[in-house]
Amino acid sequence: MRRLQKVIQPDVRYVDQLAKVRLNQGHDALLLIHIEVQTRRAGKTLALRMLRYHHRLFEAYPGYTHFPCAILLDRKRGPEVETFRVPVLGGEHVFRFPVVNLAAWETRQHELHSIAPTNPFAVVVLAQLACRATRPDQTRLVSKLELAKLLKYWSYSVDKRFQLMLVIDTLLTLPEPLEDAFYDAAQHIEDEHTMERLNSFQRVRLRRERQAAEEIGMQKGLQAGLAKGIEQGAQAGIAETLHMLLQQKFGDLPDWVNQRLQHADTPVLQHWVVRIIHAKSLHDVFDS
């Protein structure tokens, strides 16, 4: 019999996330979380890749219980258990692992809201679903503000809110003008200490301070003219953003709302942006 020789090239693989957890029974376990983000379908190689990860971790960490689990961000329908199966000389090799189809929770968000007060993972899923459902525009701004408000309503500790806000801020990214609007509104939700800890908010603050320093160095006449132009541009942007927020929350707007937005100055517009968070009607926003 001819001896077959095959040169096996090194195959380096990295798991998406590996966590050590303590089970209710008292012993430690390793939880492998594999995240598929690049396609809407898991692909035929998912089960094989999960099997390879499982075997290598089993060899690297003997003595632990292993729990492989795959999270598919974009699959709405599919089995909750994937299987790798191959026949072997009259027998078969079978490997099964659970799958979380995250997009399938779009129609079950009421369940997520019901468990979110005591389950931070539900908050992360809500943020991911909001990211999938929105673009970086006023609609996403509304979703981001709503989650920020709910964190406070759900009575999470300051540290937990900080950690969750970092996740929410990473997922629900916004362009600079809307990020500024979110920062202004969120200051009326969160305490100042928590706000200062958030990275994106710190970047906004540093940018504002730098802009203020540059304006101070300008000649008085040029500074006044430039400030006026900036004010007019900012005023129009805030009015447009507020119009979109109102439309998103209350539907079609009456003419008197458009007239008030057109004639309001910047401080008044910013005041209305803050009031919309808790408003239940248009009059709650505009009435003093």
Image (cartoon, rainbow, N blue to C red):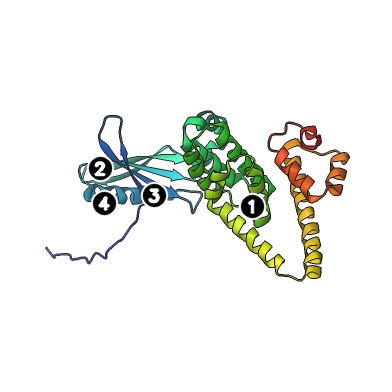
Which amino acid type is shown beneath numbered disc 2?
Answer: Glu
Whether 3 is drawn above or below 152: the answer is below
- Spatial CA distance of label 1 from label 2 is 55 Å
Residue at horizontal 27 percent and vertical 49 percent from the top: 57
Q: Which residue position holds label 3?
A: 46
- Spatial CA distance of label 1 from label 4 is 43 Å
- Of 226 and 107, which appears nearest the observer? 226
Q: Which residue position holds label 4?
A: 56
- Of 44 and 182, which appears nearest the observer? 182
Q: Which residue position holds label 1?
A: 179
- Spatial CA distance of label 1 from label 3 is 37 Å
Q: Return the disc, 3 or 4, that comes first in the chain's sequence.
A: 3
- Spatial CA distance of label 3 from label 4 is 16 Å
Residue 27: image location, x then y, percent: 25, 35
Residue 233: image location, x then y, percent: 78, 58
Q: Return the disc, 1 or 4, that comes first in the chain's sequence.
A: 4
Q: Regarding mark 3 in the picture, which secondary structure is present there?
A: helix
Q: Is 257 left, or right, of 47 in this rendering? A: right
Q: Regarding mark 2 in the picture, which secondary structure is present there?
A: strand
Q: Which residue position holds label 2?
A: 92
